[in-house]
């Protein structure tokens, strides 16, 4: 199991099974590359094997995500970062009045606002914002507040950050994705709905060649949460004709994985 996100305060640990994610997609890629029917013995060419290995690497990589502050890091935080983590608004105000840099970075290039996002401290973020915090700053792993909250399935903090001025459409993460793509990947349906309402770009393509709709299929489990994500994306007008780098559309990917309800939703939206 791969830990996607953990937190020392109010966040739950979410896990993804690497085999659950990879096996159906790689099997589909195998049949696309070879043209073989399932179960049919064939001769595999070297470049096909290399392509499949590359597919494995590309799919597995997004499951590695944000570095959440651990206990040792929290203990070593500068005073303003620690106050943000604790939601101590009185101390935040005092430190800023004494000259603390509201946009100071820790060793992972996280600002106090990033720490407030990881700890889901809305009041702390408000005070930091009022003092001039850059709410669109990216940390050392290229995450902003909205994407941190989207991955954590924290729609309330995310909406608060957007209300304060965090752009919901920033390009974030090492994958050049967006908060919407991350939330679609994880099946965070309420987060997806709120991002759509906030004007997040529906059809952004990350550096793996995937949109939010493609990720909801390829990295989803086909269950209720991912069905709701697809329903929201399709209803909002996400372009289901955008294919991945191998020419597979979201509908093709859903059918190949046996995700009948997701395939039905995509067809109904065309």
Image (spheres, rainbow, N blue to C red):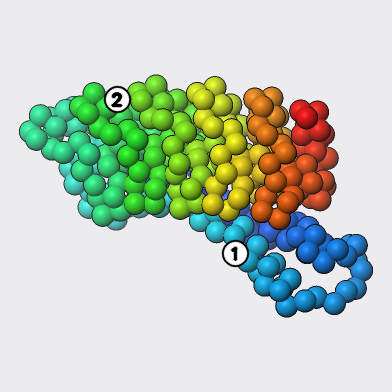
Q: Which residue is drawn at 62% across and 57% down?
A: 59
Relative image position of residue 91 (x, y in whole percent): 17, 32
Q: Which residue is drawn at 79% across and 46% down?
A: 252
Look at the numbered disc 1 and give the secondary structure of its residue: helix
Label 1: few (<14), some (14–19) or many (≥20) C-alpha neighbours in 10 Å? few
Residue 187 falls left or right of residue 102 = right
Look at the numbered disc 2 and give the secondary structure of its residue: helix
Q: How far apart are marks 1 and 2 (CA)?
A: 40 Å
User: Camera-side residue: 23 or 87?
Assistant: 23
Label 2: few (<14), some (14–19) or many (≥20) C-alpha neighbours in 10 Å? some
Relative image position of residue 38 (x, y in whole percent): 89, 62
Q: Can residue 38 be seen in this view?
A: yes
User: Camera-side residue: 230 or 100?
Assistant: 230
Residue 24 falls left or right of residue 100 = right
User: Camera-side residue: 8 or 197?
Assistant: 197
Relative image position of residue 187 (x, y in whole percent): 62, 39
- Whether 175 is drawn above or below 192: the answer is below
User: Camera-side residue: 120 or 189?
Assistant: 189
Tell me the tag on residue 57: 1
Q: Residue at x 80, y 38 (%)?
A: 263
- Whether 220 is drawn above or below 190: the answer is below
Residue 43 falls left or right of residue 8 = right
Q: Earlier in the sequence, mark 1 or mark 2?
A: 1
Residue of label 2: 126
């Amino acid at each position: 199991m791969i830990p996607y996100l953990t937190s020392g305060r109010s966040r739950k640990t979410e896990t993804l099974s690497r085999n659950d994610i990879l096996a159906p997609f790689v099997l589909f890629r195998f049949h696309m590359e070879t043209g073989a029917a399932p179960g049919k013995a064939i001769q595999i060419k070297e470049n096909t094997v290399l392509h499949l290995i590359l597919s494995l690497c590309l799919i597995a990589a997004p499951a590695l995500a944000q570095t959440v502050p651990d206990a040792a890091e929290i203990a070593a935080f500068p005073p303003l970062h620690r106050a943000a983590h604790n939601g101590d608004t009185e101390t935040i105000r005092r430190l800023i009045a004494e000259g603390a840099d509201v946009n100071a970075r820790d060793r992972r290039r996280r600002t106090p606002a990033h720490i407030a996002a990881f700890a889901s401290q809305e009041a702390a973020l408000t005070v930091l914002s009022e003092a001039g915090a850059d709410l669109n700053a990216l940390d050392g792993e290229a995450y902003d507040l909205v994407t941190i909250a989207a991955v954590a399935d924290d729609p309330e903090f995310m909406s608060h950050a957007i209300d304060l001025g965090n752009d919901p459409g920033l390009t974030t993460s090492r994958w050049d994705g967006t908060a919407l793509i991350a939330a679609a990947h994880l099946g965070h349906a309420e987060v997806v709905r709120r991002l759509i309402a906030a004007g997040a770009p529906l059809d952004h393509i990350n550096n793996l060649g995937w949109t939010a709709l493609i990720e909801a299929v390829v990295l989803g489990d086909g269950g209720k949460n991912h069905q709701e994500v697809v329903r929201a994306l399709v209803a909002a007008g996400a372009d289901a004709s955008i294919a991945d780098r191998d020419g597979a559309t979201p509908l093709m990917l859903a059918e190949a994985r046996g995700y009948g309800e997701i395939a039905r939703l995509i067809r109904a939206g065309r």
